[in-house]
């Protein structure tokens, strides 16, 4: 992704969480990350491994995320 979009400052973190839990885990990580706050946070979810309900919950939580918390 860094090469494709020429984003040298992109920091990617690979963690495995279910969609409905990912936002809470990321908010916890941001609260404890010395490099925070970030200008943007992106979520990449494997939709084949998740139920529709899990995806709906994850999307709902992600829409309300504040990168500075």
Image (cartoon, grey):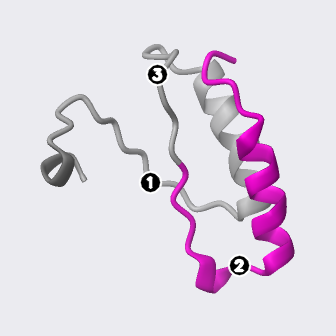
Name the secondary structure under disc 3: loop
Residue 60 percent location from the top left of the image? 81, 51
Residue 58 percent location from the top left of the image? 76, 56
Upstream in sequence: badge 2 or badge 1? 1
Query: Which residue is identified by label 3?
Result: 39
Tell me: residue 66, above or below residue 50.
above
Q: Nearer the viewer, residue 64 or 48?
A: 64
Query: Which residue is identified by label 2?
Result: 50
Tell me: residue 34, above or below residue 6.
above
Q: Is residue 56 magenta?
A: yes
Q: CA distance from mark 3 to mark 2?
A: 28 Å
- Foreground mark, 3 or 2? 3
Residue at horizontal 78 percent and vertical 81 percent from the top: 51
Q: Quadrant of residue 49?
A: bottom right
Q: CA distance from mark 2 to mark 1?
A: 17 Å
Boundaries of the magenta span: 43-69
Q: Is residue 32 toward the left or the right of residue 14 in the image?
A: right
- Foreground mark, 3 or 1? 3
Q: Quadrant of residue 7?
A: top left
How many other residues sit within 10 Å of disc 2, few (<14), some (14-19) or many (≥20)? Answer: few
Query: Which residue is identified by label 1?
Result: 14
- Quadrant occupied by the C terminus: top right
- Foreground mark, 2 or 1? 2
Residue 6 image label: none
Name the secondary structure under disc 1: loop
Residue 68 percent location from the top left of the image? 62, 16
Residue at horizontal 29 percent and vertical 35 percent from the top: 10
């Amino acid at each position: 992704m860094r090469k494709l979009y020429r984003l040298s400052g992109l920091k990617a973190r690979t963690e495995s969480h279910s969609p409905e839990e990912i936002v809470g885990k990321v908010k916890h990580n941001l609260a404890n990350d010395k490099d925070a706050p970030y200008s943007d946070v992106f979520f990449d979810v494997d939709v084949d491994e998740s139920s529709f309900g899990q995806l709906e919950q994850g999307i709902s939580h992600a829409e309300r995320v504040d990168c500075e918390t």
